[in-house]
Amino acid sequence: MSFSPPDFVDTTVREITVDDSVPQPSAGTTVVFTGVSSQGSTVAITDPNTAANPVKVLLDPQFVEEVENLFIAIATANVNLAFEATEASRQLATTGVQIRVGVDEQGNFLQIGGLVIRGKSANGLSISLEGGLATEAVPPESLPPVLSRIFAAGLSAVSLMSNALASAALQVDVPVLNTLTELSRGDDYLLGTEFNDGVILSKGKDVIIGGGGDDVFIADSVLSKAKTKLTMDGSGGNAGADGSDDLVVSKRAIRRSKRRAKIIIDDFDSARDDIILETSPRRVTGIGTDELTITTKKGGVIEIISGGTPFNPGGIEFV
């Protein structure tokens, strides 16, 4: 099993030069995207004070289906971007918002370290973090509680020495991540950085391409009907590759999911990557094969499928 990078990597999320001609809303501002302008809408987030006072993007009910001309450029460290959708716009198949790293007038990618995107209220996001300088960390208080639970339970010596949770595990009670993205209710596309990315999965049909660094992909809510295609170690032209990555499936996802969901991993490396399950081994079958099946308390099934590399016992943690 394998899949090619989606076209958005090269074409859908266009390059945005951040200069004085691009609107730059300050921290605490609400940006309204209606999707009715034929010329499109572009804003750049350049105020680092959004870490404490996020820029909110209101998705207006006037949205037109399949809008492809709403763009957001991230152009400073510690950006906190939150989506708010009305009931009408939540019913759309996609809200057409496209997010990428901004470039300066010389074409250099800008700083995005500490980036937090809260996309849960949107339907359909295309996000390219390719090229972004992400050397600052996401504040611990912005990370999901499931990661603290993972630390409290403890991981094996192998995991602690090899993956994204390691550096923090020896110092504090949360991992060191440089970006955190909460995917939307709909179908999303995400291309990660070459640093440490955290991605909170949704129940859409999502395509996620990780980069370098040690990334964490987190299922912490209902996954019913989800179909996630996940490339852990990078492709599609982004600078990142390799890294020791983790897929975390929380007890909340396992308890609440009522129907079948699939997480298809293109390049699981049993020597470096880990599947971390917040459940008991008796709910999991398929260890030693390339397909894990987790039964949920609501009668659903979560399938985790590897592209040919078996899930051996050393690459699975039960916490």
Image: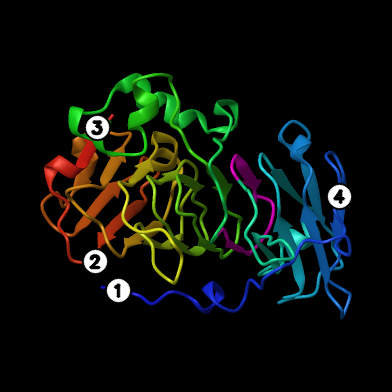
Q: Residue at x 82, y 61 (%)?
A: 19
Please give left or right for residue 23 compared with residue 180 in the image.
Answer: right
Query: Closer to the camera: disc 4 or disc 1?
Result: 4
Check whether the beta carbons of the residues at disc 2 and disc 3 lie within 8 A of each other: no
Looking at marks 4 and 2 on the same chain, the residue that comes earlier in the sequence is marked by 4
Where does the image place residue 226, in percent across and percent down from the top left? Answer: 46, 59
Check whether the beta carbons of the residues at disc 4 and disc 1 lie within 8 A of each other: no
Q: CA gap, disc 2 to disc 3?
A: 25 Å
Q: Tell me where residue 138 sits by quadrant.
A: top right
Where does the image place residue 221, in percent across and percent down from the top left? Answer: 50, 43
**Amino acid under disc 4:** Pro
Q: CA gap, disc 1 to disc 3?
A: 29 Å
Please give left or right for residue 302 compared with residue 175 in the image.
Answer: left
Q: CA gap, disc 3 to disc 4?
A: 41 Å
| Label number found at residue 2 | 1
Tell me, yes or no, if residue 86 can be seen here. no
Q: CA gap, disc 4 to disc 1?
A: 41 Å
Q: CA gap, disc 4 to disc 2?
A: 43 Å
Give the quarter of the figure containing the N terminus. Answer: bottom left
Query: Closer to the camera: disc 4 or disc 2?
Result: 4
Quickly name the residue at label 4: 25
Check whether the beta carbons of the residues at disc 2 and disc 1 lie within 8 A of each other: yes
Q: Residues within 10 Å of mark 1 (few under 14, many from 20)?
A: few
Tell me, yes or no, if residue 165 can be seen here. yes
| Label number found at residue 307 | 2
